[in-house]
Amino acid sequence: MAYSRIFDIIEHQAEAYPLEVCLARREDKKTWKTYSTHEITDTALRLSRGLLDKGVERGDKIAIISTTNRPEWHFTDLACLQIGAIDVPIYPTISSKEYEFIFNHAEIKFIFLSDKVLYRKIESILPNVPSVQGVFCFDENDYVTHWKTLLSDNTERDVEINAIKNSIQPDDLATIIYTSGTTGTPKGVMLSHHNIVSNVKDCLLAVPVGQADIILSFLPLSHVFERTLNYTYFAGGASVYFADGLESISDHLQDIRPHYFATVPRLLERVYEKLIKKGKQLTGIKKELFFWAVKQAKINPLGRERTFTEHSNLLVADKFIYSKWREALGGRIKAIICGSAPLQERLATIFTNAGIPILEGYGLTECSPVVSVVPFRKQDFRAGCVGKVLHSVQVQIAADGELLIKGPNVMMGYYKNPEETAKSFNSDGWLLSGDIGEFTADGFLKITDRKKELFKTSGGKYVAPSPIENKLKESNYIEQVALVGDNEKYISALILPNFDNLTGWAEQRKLDATDKTILTQLPEVKQLYKDIITNFNVNFGKVEQIKQFELITDEWTPENGLLTATMKLKRKAIKEKYQNIIDKFYSKNL
């Protein structure tokens, strides 16, 4: 059957290629609990009946919050969508204040959450949300009603359910996804069935995930990136295995040996750091061979024919080194899909040359979310770009460099926010992405920065911080970095060291590395980072060069409000937290 609404996708799978394992999750940390296509559609149907019994009506808003991905998320999603309810997936890491705003703004009627820890997080605000009529939990506990109590075998509801399904149109609202981005109050992005389904079909053209493929899923389903990819896996007939959490990914890679998974650049950076750390522990010829292989992967650009020597060197490196990297990922990886933030060009090059293709993409929640992706074709593998624009999507570059987007994937607007909706489109109906970009000569899209993140020095020169920060993170001693300098004479940097590598460096030099704060203040460490900055500055224009820096010790995370849920810097929050340090940067006369 053709599919035009989100819930049609799983029914398409049931008709075209029903799977014995459509979804799976470890429920006792050892054994995988699997769910067939039939079990998923049947469970969603039973839950739809129960929701109708509870008085859920078409257009009601249902929140879904989970600390990890799990089959119950999809059961709830499908159960809501096929009776015309609007589901509102929410990140588990946001603050209680943000929960209260979203619950009230969306007028949430019922909440589904994963565990009692999340319930305790929202429990105190529930009296302030009059629309909520009930809370259900995926885990069994003594605090919250278990979700399975809603499952109903009352088949008399099925006539009503079928009538509702038949009445739902592709352009009807399906979901509201709240996104605050790096600044501002959360905005509810309204996406229709057609928005998401069109994106699924386009993604399948670029990344042909198919039957017999195994997927490892660990990015949060509350983000439309992983959610749309999950629907794409359903449409292609792949089996999706949910990770217990980020700490279990290594075990899962060996256990299920996936063909694909999606990730964000930060996790790829950590994988690379671990590889390099293991390489440094080698000795003799093994160590030399390892770093020779890393060099070969790094120096050979993608997207062109290899010379005989290049090809031969990569074959040798593959036999002795790269094949072991792939084994660490399960040995069957076809590609890694990467998005949500800029990826270091060298990492895309190294991994792809090592037989682990990185398919970097670009998108926005407002675009359901994918706008472009590196296609799964060897001649199209690229680094430093975000691939080619999807089949149904159009992208123009405005006079100031901003990307303008049109297509069936572009949102309906922001919920209850016509002013922000109007500001997000130009007079010709193109979505204003807020991103600055360009096309290469061969039609690949490059993102150079966020328009809102560009800042101007007091000399009137604009600086794009992201490319500079990304370059700095190529250092083994830099974990995170944020540039500052808006309306100032020069650029400065807040740097979180990679303490694993810095500690090892310090211990080799008999320095005290027991306390992070003391370590970062040592003159030898300050000089190390001064030398690193000096070496990197030669890559930047005069106005982009870093004149001052400070080493900090506290990591930036979504939990402490310094990163978004998709691991982007919250620059306003970072600036506020470190204002005293920033003031000192510019109290000095250079």
Image (cartoon, rainbow, N blue to C red):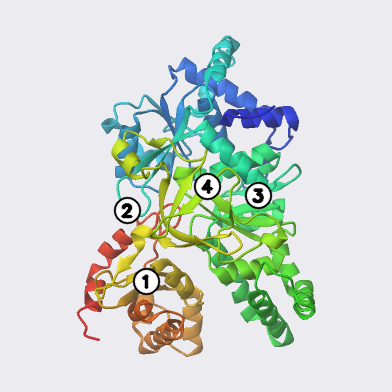
The quadrant the N terminus occupies is top right
Comes first in the chain, label 2 or label 3: 2
Q: Secondary structure at mark 1?
A: loop
Identity, as a three-letter code, of the amino acid under mark 3? Ala
Q: Which residue is mark 4?
A: 394
Comes first in the chain, label 1 or label 4: 4
Q: Is residue 213 above or below residue 443?
A: above
Please identify the quarter of the rendering in which residue 453 is found: bottom left
Most extreme residue toward the left is 587
Q: Secondary structure at mark 2?
A: loop
Q: Which residue is mark 2?
A: 183
The mark found on residue 553 in the picture is: 1
Comes first in the chain, label 2 or label 4: 2
Name the front one of labels 2 and 1.
Answer: 2
**Percent position of residue 230, x then y:** 60, 42
Mark 1 is surrounded, within 10 Å at the Cα level, by few (under 14), some (14 to 19) or many (20 or more) other residues, namely some
Please identify the quarter of the rendering in which residue 361 is found: bottom right
Of residue 244 and residue 388, the one placed in the foreground of this image is 388
Q: Which residue is mark 3?
A: 206
Identity, as a three-letter code, of the amino acid under mark 4? Gln
